[in-house]
Image (spheres, coloured by chain):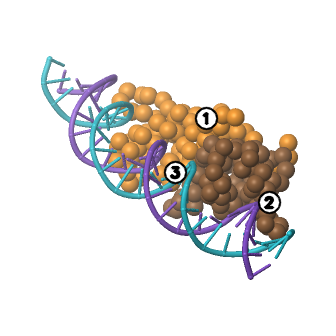
Chain colours: A brown, B orange, C purple, D cyan
Amino acid sequence: MGYREDARKIKALADENRLAIMMSLKQKEKCACYLLEELNISQSTLSHHMKLLCDSGLVDYRKEGKWMHYSLSEEGAAAFRKMIDGYIRTGK
Amino acid sequence: MGYREDARKIKALADENRLAIMMSLKQKEKCACYLLEELNISQSTLSHHMKLLCDSGLVDYRKEGKWMHYSLSEEGAAAFRKMIDGYIRTGK
DNA sequence: TCCATACATTTACATTTATCGATACGTGTG
DNA sequence: CACACGTATCGATAAATGTAAATGTATGGA
């Protein structure tokens, strides 16, 4: 019936820059200012991308003073994997 | 560096109607005319979606006379899973 | 308290994408 | 060959998305 929510989560990963962010976060937790130096995008654009990734559950955030620290969510990844598998796995 | 190709493949799955198509194909191979009856979209729109899914490698096609038969690709699914895991799996 | 810093939100705009009607293409049938 | 049928492609349009400048908000330091 409603695939909207799943489509929204998948869309969170369906962007070049967000994939680059995920790859960067694989190594370790990073703060927004660090990600901003790695990618060639504006601060507002990065903030937009991080919001989508966090909303999808794939990325966790931790606020420390003025800094936002982002990291991959293992739980989010597990749920994502499971969700994807529900669509691409053959058989019942 | 170049995440464009992966983003394109993920985008193939990032749509409500295409998720519905994948769920339908999970059961068994289906011809386009059958899918057309299941979904509430026009024939040209379905053709567009099927092209994206086939290009991503997630769906195989088989032409039989006038009919196009679509099915999930196990190889495509395996490659997709692996690709996704490369982005969401924590650690190196 | 004033200011600089880090980040989020708003606004506007350009590009991409989903959609459909019309048309073209290919295939089997009479 | 002419036609019907299934599907693909083209052209146009509306909606969604990515982007950045401007502005707002919160935090810490002088």
Res. A51 mark: none
The reply to whether the C-beta atoms of the residues labelled 1 and 2 are less than 8 Å apart is: no
Residue C20, x across and y down, in percent = 30, 49
- Vertical position of residue C30 compared to residue B80: above or below: above
Residue indicated by mark 1? B5
Residue indicated by mark 3? B15
Q: Give the distance between the C-alpha atoms of the residues marked 3 and 1, in whole angstroms.
A: 17 Å
The reply to whether the C-beta atoms of the residues labelled 3 and 2 are less than 8 Å apart is: no
The disc numbered 1 marks a residue on which chain? B
**Amino acid at circle 3:** Asp
SS class of the residue under badge 2? strand
Graded by Cα atoms within 10 Å as few (under 14), some (14 to 19) or many (20 or more), the crowding at tag 2 reads some
Q: Name the residue at 73% across, 39% down.
A: B82
The disc numbered 3 marks a residue on which chain? B
- Vertical position of residue B59 compared to residue A52: above or below: above
Q: Is residue A5 visible?
A: yes
Q: Name the residue at 66% across, 58% down.
A: A47
Q: Give the distance between the C-alpha atoms of the residues marked 3 and 2, in whole angstroms.
A: 30 Å
Q: Name the residue at 41% across, 44% down.
A: B46
Foreground pick, D19 / A23 = D19
Q: Name the residue at 57% across, 39% down.
A: B8
Residue indicated by mark 2? A69
Q: Check chain identity for marks 3 and 1: say if they share one.
A: yes
Q: Is residue A56 visible?
A: no
